[in-house]
Amino acid sequence: MKKKFIQETTSSHTTPSGDVFQVTSKKLIVHKTEDEPFYMTFLKYVGWIYGLSGVSQIKILNKLMEKAQFNTGIVSLTTGEKWEIIDELGISEVGYYKSMKQMIDSDILRKAYRVDKKTGEQIEKKGEYIINPDMFWKGELNKRKELKVTFESQIVEDDK
């Protein structure tokens, strides 16, 4: 993609005899950028593709996408943020948890884990999720590719 604009500068000069004259110069500047592919998610159809049964799941997913970190797909929800979502969407706490479970079961979301340095055990990070990068992404394309490999390798490990 090329963006073109004209930069115009005007300067005043005084000759030794005291005459004043102005010089205007114009410069055409071309700024070239590389476009990365744009990813769009049509939430209306996500429910059908992934078998989500309720509108509240799609609404919650939309909120999670808004809160997703750039280049990671990670969503960290404090207890307060969870309650903001529940209140804003007008759903029950039980409905919220059912929707989150169904999205995890449908592989739309994954719970985030950390590894205990002493035991090597995976410990769940409370309130932290990763959105499937095949479904939604905001960030650089190369970072999406890296996360996609990590996300897919977790599926293989889970199946063993």
Image: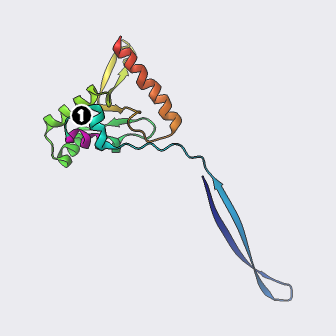
Q: Give the residue drawn at x 70%, y 64%.
A: 28
Q: In the rendering, at what x and y percent does residue 84 appear?
A: 22, 45
Q: In the rendering, at what x and y percent does residue 76 appear?
A: 32, 36
Check the image and name the residue furthest to the right.
16
Q: In the shown orientation, is residue 21 left or right of residue 92?
A: right
Magenta segment: 55-62
Q: Give the residue drawn at x 20%, y 49%.
A: 88
Q: Which quarter of the figure has residue 56?
A: top left
Q: In the rendering, at what x and y percent does residue 1 appear?
A: 60, 52
Q: On the image, numbered disc 1 is attached to which residue?
A: 52
Q: Is residue 95 visible?
A: yes
Q: Is residue 122 above or below residue 2?
A: above
Quadrant for the C terminus, please: top left
- In the image, what residue type sits under mark 1? Leu
Element type where label 1 sits in the image: loop
Q: Could you say which is closer to the camera, residue 127 or residue 157?
A: 157
Label 1 Cα crowd, 10 Å radius (few <14 / some 14-19 / many 20+): some
Question: Does the magenta-highlighted stretch encompass residue 17?
Answer: no
Q: Is residue 77 visible?
A: no
Q: In the shown orientation, is residue 68 left or right of residue 85?
A: right
Q: Could you say which is closer to the camera, residue 132 or residue 113?
A: 132
Q: Give the residue drawn at x 53%, y 34%.
A: 142
Q: Give the residue drawn at x 36%, y 17%.
A: 116
Q: Main secondary structure of the magenta part?
A: helix
